[in-house]
């Protein structure tokens, strides 16, 4: 059997690679670094990779828009799992560089934003240069003629490239974390674990007052908790928005299945991106009256009514 092929934001050393390693045994897969999130997801869509691991949300920047938008448009993809990693950086530079010598620092734009305050305090005059990834910035510094003299890199990457660490634990928020998802092509949904998450994209009906409220009611009426909802502008219809939603629970559970039926009946587009184990591991909250047994009992009561039982 050939090893499953994974695409991830490279080069080697990115937080995305660390997330990939946290999800699968690197010895059992073939991992290919790619230049950005759309390239990783295109590799899956086009069949060059079986899976991709991509960042979807971080505690400072919120949703990773490249991921949310690329998942929501184009041929169907499925989220199969998630992992959350704590994120803090090392400020790295070529040996002999002092903090006061630094005139320009590079990192992924999310990395720069995750260290905005630190950079303002410690390197107030330095230009901030966006790179395709934090690890790519460190690599360019080590090997090339980089137009910057420092980089914010994932821990350990600078030393492995022969760079010096000028500061470690760099992060504005000591609790900063990034959530990554494993994405594949759609297949039968893996069974519920009891601690699951379902990700959806919903387009609301045009020009209808209360459309957002009635979409949310589909979840509320079945006791389904949302853990994330964000709106994104639609590239095909300027001025209109799609909603990217994480809901706690699994499509195999009647409360989630009924919410999906309601969403499908009342909204023009519902994209199901998958039901998969939640990284928190917290059991799915079950509101009174929404357990599987209560749905089953109520259904058989209705069946009984039809058959004349009162
Ligand atoms: O994987 C990496 O190292 C990245 O550079 C990407 C990325 C992101 O897309 O958010 C990943 C984690 C950090 O939050 C900062 C940047």
Image (tube, rainbow, N blue to C red):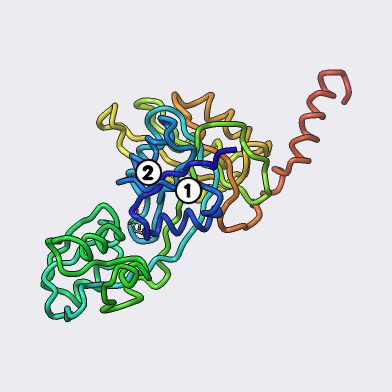
Q: Mark 1 highlights which residue?
A: 181
Q: State left or right for residue 285 relative to residue 83.
A: right
The residue carrying pointer 1 sits among few (fewer than 14), some (14 to 19) or many (20 or more) residues within 10 Å by Cα, namely many
In front here: 92 or 250?
92
Q: Is residue 166 visible?
A: yes
Residue found farthest to the right: 309
Establish whether ligand 1 lies closer than 8 Å to the Cβ of label 2.
yes
Relative image position of residue 166 (x, y in whole percent): 26, 79
In front here: 116 or 100?
100
Q: Mark 2 highlights which residue?
A: 67
Relative image position of residue 162 (x, y in whole percent): 28, 72
Relative image position of residue 170 (x, y in whole percent): 32, 73
Relative to 287, residue 107 above or below: below
Q: Secondary structure at mark 1?
A: strand
Distance from the alpha carbon under mark 1 to that under mark 2: 10 Å
In front here: 158 or 22?
158
Please give the name of the residue rendered at 14% of the width and 74% of the height, measured from the top-left corner.
102
Verify CB contact (< 8 Å) between mark 1 and mark 2: yes
Q: State left or right for residue 224 relative to residue 20.
A: right
């Amino acid at each position: 059997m050939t090893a499953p092929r994974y695409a991830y934001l490279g080069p080697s050393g990115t937080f995305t690679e660390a997330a990939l390693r946290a999800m699968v045994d690197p010895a059992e897969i073939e991992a290919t670094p790619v230049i950005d999130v759309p390239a990783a997801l295109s590799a899956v869509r086009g069949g060059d990779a079986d899976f991709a691991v991509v960042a979807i949300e971080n505690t400072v920047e919120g949703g990773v828009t490249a991921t949310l938008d690329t998942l929501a448009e184009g041929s169907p993809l499925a989220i199969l799992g998630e992992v959350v990693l704590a994120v803090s950086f090392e400020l790295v530079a070529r040996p002999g560089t002092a903090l006061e010598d630094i005139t320009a620092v590079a990192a992924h734009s999310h990395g720069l934003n995750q260290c905005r305050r630190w950079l303002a305090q410690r390197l107030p005059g330095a230009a901030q240069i966006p790179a395709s990834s934090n690890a790519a910035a460190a690599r360019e510094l080590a090997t090339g003629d980089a137009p910057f003299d420092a980089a914010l890199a994932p821990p350990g990457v600078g030393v492995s490239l022969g760079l010096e660490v000028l500061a470690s634990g760099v992060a504005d928020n000591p609790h900063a974390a990034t959530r990554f998802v494993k994405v594949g092509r759609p297949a039968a949904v893996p069974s519920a674990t009891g601690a699951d998450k379902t990700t959806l994209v919903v387009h609301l009906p045009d020009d209808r007052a209360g459309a957002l409220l009635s979409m949310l009611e589909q979840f509320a009426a079945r006791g389904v908790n949302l853990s994330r909802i964000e709106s994104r502008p639609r590239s095909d219809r300027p001025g209109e928005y799609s909603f990217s939603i994480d809901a706690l629970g699994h499509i195999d559970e009647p409360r989630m299945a009924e919410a999906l039926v309601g969403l499908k009946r009342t909204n023009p587009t519902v994209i199901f991106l998958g039901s998969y184990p939640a990284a928190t591991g917290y059991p799915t909250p079950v509101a009174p009256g929404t357990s599987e047994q209560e749905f089953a009992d109520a259904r058989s009561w209705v069946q009984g009514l039809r058959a004349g039982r009162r």
